[in-house]
Image (cartoon, rainbow, N blue to C red):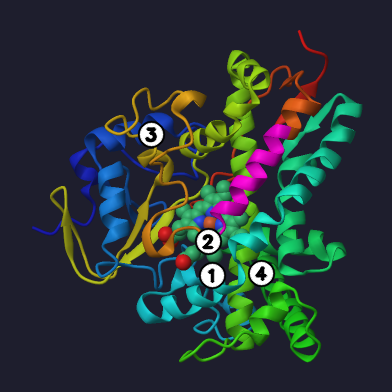
Amino acid sequence: MAVDKPSDAVPHLNYDPFSLPQRDHPYPVWSAMRDEAPVLWSDAINAWVVTRYADATRIIADTETFRNEGSTRSLATPPREVSDVLATGLPRDELRSTQDLDGPEHARIRKFLAAILTPRRIGGLAPRARQIADDLLAPMVEQGGGDFVADFAYRLPLALITQLLGIPEEDGERLHHWSTQKMALQWSRLDPQDHVRAAQDYVDFQNYLVDLIRRRRAEPIGDVVSAFTQLRMPDERPLTDTEIVGQMMGLIAAGHETTTNFLSLTLWRLLEHQEVWRSVCANPALIPGLVEEGLRLESPAGIWRRTSRAVTLHGKEIPAGARVQVLLPAANRDPDVFPSADVLDVHRGPEHPHLAFGRGIHYCIGAGLARIEGKAAFESLVSGAPGIRLAEGFVPHFKPNASQRYLERLTVEIGSLP
Ligand code: HEM
């Protein structure tokens, strides 16, 4: 028997990442879902939600049944005023990042990305990452604290992704705004005015990139954008300008929003337990383990797929064409895989089976960069602000978003050591 809304089997369970208190404190509902309804329909996000680790790995591995194409489209069909604005931009079907592609189409673009974003190119950013982290921390230390999200966490990955891609530094803030608007357009609920504004920003983002790509095509300068325009691969069509825009947008958004959230969520958890923070300060060799543990415990991103055929999971019949969210932060707290799964344990070590970067053919292409950023940020904090603590009365609040966990602010005080 096909069941559209299996939540009727567990009437008290309703997954809605927009509603409070779930938005700020989702842990009890994730745990109940894992235990009682590992495949649950959510009206709020119009998708089936999967929370167990074993199901997550099975879904990610089955790329025939669980496809990426169409999985990252906006949650709701945009109203007419919004689609009119979007229609003034590039053709939507061509404007796809690797996350929207499957099979040979995905493999083709991924080959270009892998040839350009080499470990050497990314590893070369490590000293710069540490320098930027120190520069961002210095004024916070001088002022005795601040909002770690606004003063540090988005600035470090933004500076690095713009440098990596070859985007002029002075355009960073505009790109940050556009990228935030793109994410909101895709994964938030916007009122009509904000919706139209976000659509216009999305089109402006495209126009900016088209212009940059054309300039680099005419006059290459050895950066990533120039490389996208120049690279030729045996037996592969070169990338078109629209395809390059799709990849650049994917890299800019994935390349700094997720890392912003990872840095702030990890620091929040760490400062909640001053004894853990002090043990990291006393032994900075724990930092790589802390980075992996932060990624596991508060995984910032979810994974989306669309079914190519009807499939039955835990007795629930998921129809063909349905959207599925693999809720990585819930899967990464699965006690069947991680003992004391709700605890930040920096001694789990860096050899970690967590899924924060996904797995398989869509495995995060920026995982190396995110790790460099995490290491730089926490090394800088350990040496420059060992007296950091959560501001008195700090209460975490999250932005409404169906895909990522955005801590709105993280107010900290930086004083001398107790
Ligand atoms: C802590 C930071 C980050 C997290 C948690 C994260 C998470 C993820 C996840 C879960 C996926 C898999 C998506 C899927 O299977 O559909 C992914 C893919 C991707 N990530 Fe990241 N990411 C991070 C940082 C970055 C950075 C810094 C970049 C760019 C430099 C980046 C670029 C990408 C790209 C291009 C893909 C798509 C790969 C493909 O579809 O083949 N990410 N990321």
In this figure, which residue is indicated by the disc labeled 1? 114
**Residue shown at the point (71%, 68%) measured from the top left:** 165
Identity, as a three-letter code, of the amino acid under mark 2: Ile
The amino acid type, in three-letter code, at marker 3 is Arg
Ligand 1 neighbours mark 4 (CB distance < 8 Å): no
For the residues bearing labels 2 and 1, Cβ distance under 8 angstroms? yes
Residue at image x 81%, y 87%? Answer: 219
2 vs 4, front mark: 2
- Quadrant of residue 198 within the rendered picture: bottom right
Q: Secondary structure at mark 2?
A: loop
Please identify the residue farthest to the left as the structure is shown: 1
Mark 1 vs mark 4, CA separation in Å: 35 Å
Work out which residue is located at the far top of the displayed protein and give it.
418
Q: Which residues are magenta?
A: 365-379
Q: Which residue is mark 2?
A: 365
What amino acid is at disc 1? Answer: Ala
Q: Is residue 223 above or below residue 395?
A: below
Label 3 sits on residue: 333
- 200 up-or-down from 53: above or below: below
User: Which of the 4 quarters of the picture holds residue 91?
Assistant: bottom right
Q: CA distance from mark 3 to mark 1?
A: 30 Å
The x, y position of residue 89, in whole percent, is 64, 83
